[in-house]
Amino acid sequence: MLKVYLLIFVIFVGTYGLRKNEFLEAGVMLPSSVKRASDNCLDSSRLDKFVERVPEDKLGDPASFVCAFIAFQKSDMKMTAPYTADDVDMRFDNFAKCAREVREYNAEDSTATFGVNKFCDMTEEERADHLGLGELGGGLGM
């Protein structure tokens, strides 16, 4: 009987993905609005795929970009310091806005391809400072 309960527990945990503390152990911070996410989110090689897969009707919902945000943190693209509990929500909001802009720009212009870049979790001020633009910063890290 114990084996049956153990098997049910393993299936339940595996089905519902990793919880917040498991992502912390993997060096990833989740926004406070997220209680759990799929372990597939840890595959940073799928970053652009995670952004592309967000359905059009979900682009306005930042939570749709959680897997992309997690993959971004695991990639070598991220330039900001490791997130803290105090700034992860702001970083996630910045990232979701950038990912949404990438999708919108790609839908508008078929002659160019836009993607998530190292500036996506930065504030406008951080981007401008990093690029030496002062107060001239703009969307997609420019």
Image (cartoon, grey):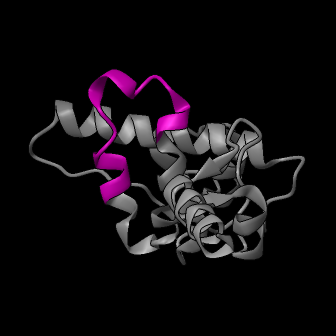
Q: Is residue 61 magenta?
A: yes
**Residue at image location 57% in from the left, 45% down from the top:** 95
Residue 53 left/right relative to 112: right
User: Can you give x and y, in whole percent of width and height, for residue 49 in the image?
Assistant: 30, 57
Residue 39 left/right relative to 30: left
Pick the front one: 70 or 35:
35
Q: Is residue 107 above or below residue 74?
A: above
Residue 49 left/right relative to 40: left
Pick the front one: 19 or 46:
19
User: Can you give x and y, in whole percent of width and height, for residue 87 in the image?
Assistant: 83, 47
Instruction: Give the position of the N terminus as an image quadrant.
Output: bottom right
Pick the front one: 46 or 141:
46
Q: Is residue 136 above or below residue 111?
A: above
User: Can you give x and y, in whole percent of width and height, for residue 94 in the image?
Assistant: 62, 40
**Residue at image location 86% in from the left, 57% down from the top:** 84
Can residue 133 be seen at all in this image of the molecule? no
User: Can you give x and y, in whole percent of width and height, for residue 26 in the image?
Assistant: 69, 75
Residue 66 left/right relative to 45: right
Q: Which residues are magenta?
A: 49-64
Total marks in image: 0
Q: Is residue 30 magenta?
A: no
Kindly give the residue lying farthest to the front in the view shown. Answer: 1
Can residue 58 be seen at all in this image of the molecule? yes
Kindly give the residue lying farthest to the right in the view shown. Answer: 86
Pick the front one: 58 or 106:
58
Provide the major secondary structure of the magenta segment. helix
Kindly give the residue lying farthest to the left in the view shown. Answer: 111
